[in-house]
Amino acid sequence: MEFEDDLDATVRRADPDRWLASRFIADEAARADVVALYALNIELSRIAEVVREPLMGEIRLTWWREAIDELFAGRPPRGHPVVQALATAITRRGLAAAPFVAMIEARFADFEPSALSDLAAAEAYLDGAAGALMALAVAVLGGGEALAVRPAAQAWGLAGLARLGRLPEGFSGQDLRRRVDEGLDAARKAAAGLPVAAFPAVAYAGLARPYAAGRTPSELEKRLRLTLSVLTGRI
């Protein structure tokens, strides 16, 4: 479908690391469903970038919450390409509502300056903003227990917060690198139980280490890291 091609192009442009990992999903329908999830994440994350007034941001997040609620209530999808693609993914994969709600609810913190004041608050935020997304992608690809992805999502998310300058106050670069290393070590053990087909949903977390070190890997390095990760089943 044309709008699926448009979403793929959007994700490639706005979220190139997840998009690149999605290229390792062999099944085209499954890849489209994962891309729909990533497109939703882009829509949610963009709200804080384009809206200055917290109230307007909250209104937009509420729109998404209502759109998702309507899908799970069996109502026709709203006329938005991401909502339409999500309707297909939810029906095709039997996805649960809770992770979608968690993704949306986490983003209300984007409009609270002190929301990520400490590590516990940051981790709670990342459980929704990064963990719920990763768990949904794993579910699309036939993975099991959602908790298995938490260490990978936390490591990836902390590196992402560092790139955005949103780490908790007093959280040093050394603290970041240590937490990312610990998270990836735990993620390797947790991800060992994932089926091979589900691994592209977590493989990009392996890029957190160079990001945490303040280095953006080249496209070649990204491709090599992701290829090795998917082939070996190691993050």
Image (cartoon, rainbow, N blue to C red):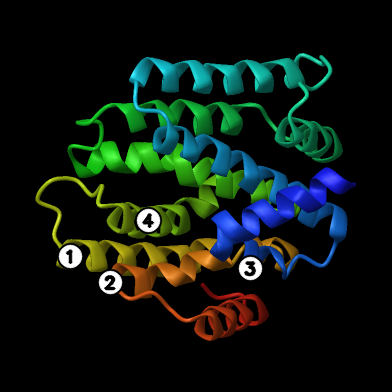
Marks 2 and 1: CB-CB under 8 Å? yes
Q: CA distance from mark 4 to mark 3?
A: 17 Å
The residue beneath circle 3 is 20
Numbered disc 1: secondary structure: helix
Numbered disc 3: secondary structure: helix
Residue 34 appears in the figure: no
Numbered disc 4: secondary structure: helix
- Of callouts 1 and 4, the N-terminal one: 4
At a point 73% along the width and 29% down the height, the residue shown is: 80
Q: CA distance from mark 1 to mark 3?
A: 27 Å
Marks 4 and 2: CB-CB under 8 Å? no
Q: CA distance from mark 2 to mark 1?
A: 9 Å
For residue 104, the mark is none
Horizontal side of residue 39 vs 53, given as left or right: right
The residue beneath circle 1 is 173
Horizontal side of residue 69 vs 116, given as left or right: right
Q: Amino acid at mark 2?
A: Gly
For residue 214, the mark is 2
